[in-house]
Image (spheres, grey):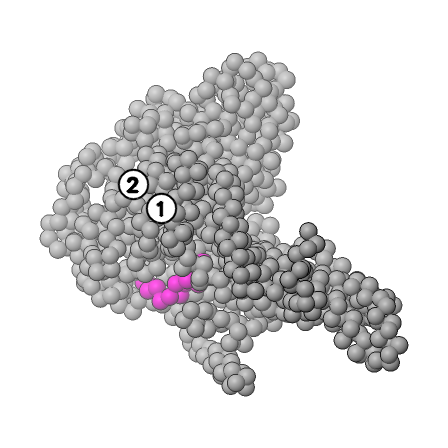
Amino acid sequence: MRKSLLAVATAAALVGAFAAPSADAKTFKWAFQGDAQSLDPHSLNETFTLGLLGNVYEGLIRRGPELDIQPALAERWEILEPTKWRFYLRKGVKFHNGNDFNADDVLFTAERTAAEGSDLKTRLAGVKDIIKVDDHTVDFVTETPNPILHYEWATWYMMDKEWSDANGATAPTDVTGGKENYATRNANGTGPFVVQSRETDVRTVMVPNDSWWDAANKKHNLTEVILTPISSDATRVAALLSGEIDMMYPVPVQDMKRIDADANTSVLAGPELRTIFLGMDQTRDELLYSNVKGKNPFKDVRVREAFYRAVEIEAIKKKVMRGLSTPSAIMISPFLFEHAGEFQRLDYDPDKAEALLAEAGYPDGFEVGMDCPNNRYVNDEAICQAVVAMLAKVGVKVDLLAQPKAQYFAKVLAPKLDTSFYLLGWTPGSFDSWNVLFNLIGTPDSDSGRGKFNLGGFSNAKVDALTLEVLSETDAANRNAMIRDAFTELHNDRGYIPLHQQGLAWGKRANIDLAQRADNQFMLYYVTVN
Amino acid sequence: MAAFIIRRLVQSLFVMFFVALVAFSMFRFVGDPVHQMVGIETSLEEREALRERLGLKDPVIVQFGNYIFKVATGDFGVSYQHKRPVSDMIAERLPATLELALISAVLSLVIGIPMGVYTGLNRDGFLSKLFLTVSLVGISLPTFLIGILLIFFFSVQLNILPSFGRGGVVDLGWWRTGFLTIDGWRALIMPSITLGLFQLTLIMRLVRAEMLEVLRTDYIKFARARGLTNRAVHFGHALKNTLVPVITITGLQLGSIIAFAIITETVFQWPGMGQMFLQAVQNVDIPIMAAYLMLIAFFFVVINLIVDLLYYVVDPRLRIDTGKGNGHG
């Protein structure tokens, strides 16, 4: 008995050893620090989940390596009236299961996106009606003119109506349902890769889709892709150095040198779209966490400017971010707004900061509590600690509370808004300034949802008016001018203290070529293994 | 005997109930799960609605009651993050953790006991001193550091062992095992050493101390006087009498190996329950946290039960006076 078991074990081991892939198979192994939560394309609006799914599913449009808008499942589109857009769907596109892609699938996807449990409802915000003109033409009717209707549609993925109906996946996964949705672990898109097997958090295997509509222009040479999430930073770095994986991200900033020093590996670094900034409570009459009683020092623009000038951004870039950041003067990535270059940060000037504080009535500074996440952004806690030290130099004593994101967001986000001074990061999902103006800078207003993430309650009526106009202005030059005016207002009011664009750092083996997108989405169809 | 076992299993239900109660009263402090479940652009109303649907707005005691009621019917809920039944997820992850824990425990016993006996018998030997010095390292270095050092030496420098994962696994339908492939065994080496090193050290030191103690007792002198061989004295009489505390400690440690595999699993990206638990904590995935804690409590109870049964096997005295054995008070 024991012998036969041993024989089975040996045989199994031998099979494992000899089943190694042949020489010309291009298996690409990569790791991220976590895994996509679900394969359901409508259950979570989060970069990595949507980015991974972007290899399997596709939207009506897609974004190129420079984030330029390209036609995808829609061949072209036109604006019939200011509130009516017509999309011409690509013909001959097939889902992985062989079904045709047509207008019914678009209508079905729209319905699914609006259903309970969907986290992508904003993709169709302001869309009043969707009309099927024929099998390959769809009209979208909006409430007001919306020049950026399709900006976020690169991650609004089309699903097959028949497949979803057949598998009971007509609505997005809902945790309260008590049972698993078929689409959570199975995918049927039109994209360049097909999910072959999936074990959440352990291993996801994809193979190329030979009947992809864009196969003629494909840039990759992969035959198999294996994603293994590795959460520990040190292990992820070790796996790349030892050659067990071909690519991984994010690279911890302290390990960048080490990876670059190895001849077989290198770091690909670039600016990300996320802006990191400091916000201040400008609403309450008395700060929740401060020794100043009876008034709120942050209501005084001089105090806000003093804080701004006390932060030495170059020191943060050099010491904390090890060069992996771009100081910003504006609340959106310069990549996404053409007038961004006209803005300049206030100079670092601790003497002036002290003078401003004295002028505002705080010659000896004051005490304030600060909230900071410690596992959300690149070196978030270290940035806050640096800020604390810098403010101490001008006499402001900051009491720092750094917490994991789960606790941090529960504390600072609405409805609690339990903070006086905080660090936050923001990437506009639409890659457009209106998103920033509406969510971060507009006066909080629960009816319209404006200022949902304006945690400090910065308020400027002119900015609010401009934001409303920007929404429906279709002339690009006018629109950009209004956006510039709004950002100028914010800058003059010192409403926020923008810090930097944090950097992206991907690590790869020397024989891998790939394209790094500034939105941190990793598209496998740009990968070649040499 | 059967009554004893049944009594213990019923006790385990109470233990699990209390663990769940304590866990639930703590969940309020781990953060808000809703912020981890939706994207940043989701509106406040939708967040509130989701909170409502998840029952997070009910008082803790109501949430706990609902949970216990569901668990009693075998429903452990659906993971907030993965949107899959928690029982399925645990069933998938359990084999990885148990295989790792088993190999670590075997390793620590198979190496720890002989080392302990040797150092007990040859107190001043060079090897004994070496073992004791090395064991200090095992007891004083934190687990994650040992793991990372092993990875950097054997994976990055020498490139002979995999730095993460389970290697090749064979799916037996109800159990994914890494025992059937060479890859799987190679992947086991570093994690099991990392996880077992502390236990190994502990067992070695325990056996050594017990051996020293027992070797001084009278019955060992009598055994020698009877002219028994060293082998019979050391292993037949001395070692056997050191085993009761060793079994107790090993049992308790096996529980903690399973429970505290969390760190080792994270360092080696070992797809077990511990790693799943840690991610659940970060994401405030309450159903997974609750189920995991209850499962671990259950393991501890069962392991203690097995330990108690083993006493009967190794210690004949317990077998003789089971009837009046409760008289000690």
Q: Is residue A377 left or right of residue A97?
A: right
- Report the Cα–Cα distance between label 1 and label 2: 9 Å
In this orientation, does residue A418 appear? yes
Q: Nearer the viewer, residue A379 or B88?
A: B88
Closer to the chain start, of discs 1 and 2, is: 1
Q: Quadrant of residue A158?
A: bottom left
The correct choice, above or below, for B44 with respect to B193 in the image is above
User: Which residue is pictured at 40% across the width and 59% down the height?
Assistant: B88
* Residue A108 picture location, percent across and down: 20, 51
Considering only vertical position in the picture, is A411 above or below B323?
Answer: above
The residue to which callout 1 is attached is A45
Check disc 1: other Cα within 10 Å, few if <14, some if 14-19, many if 20+.
many
Q: Residue at x 36, y 25 (%)?
A: A443
**Residue shown at 82% from the left, 63% from the top:** B213
- Contact, mark 1 vs mark 2 (Cβ under 8 Å): yes
Count residues near mark 2 (Cα–Cα under 10 Å), then give few for <14, some for 14-19, many for 20+: some
Q: Is residue A259 in view from this perspective? A: no
Residue A122 numbered tag: 2
As rendered, which of A409 and A50 lies closer to the eye? A409
What range of the chain is rendered magenta?
Answer: A192-205
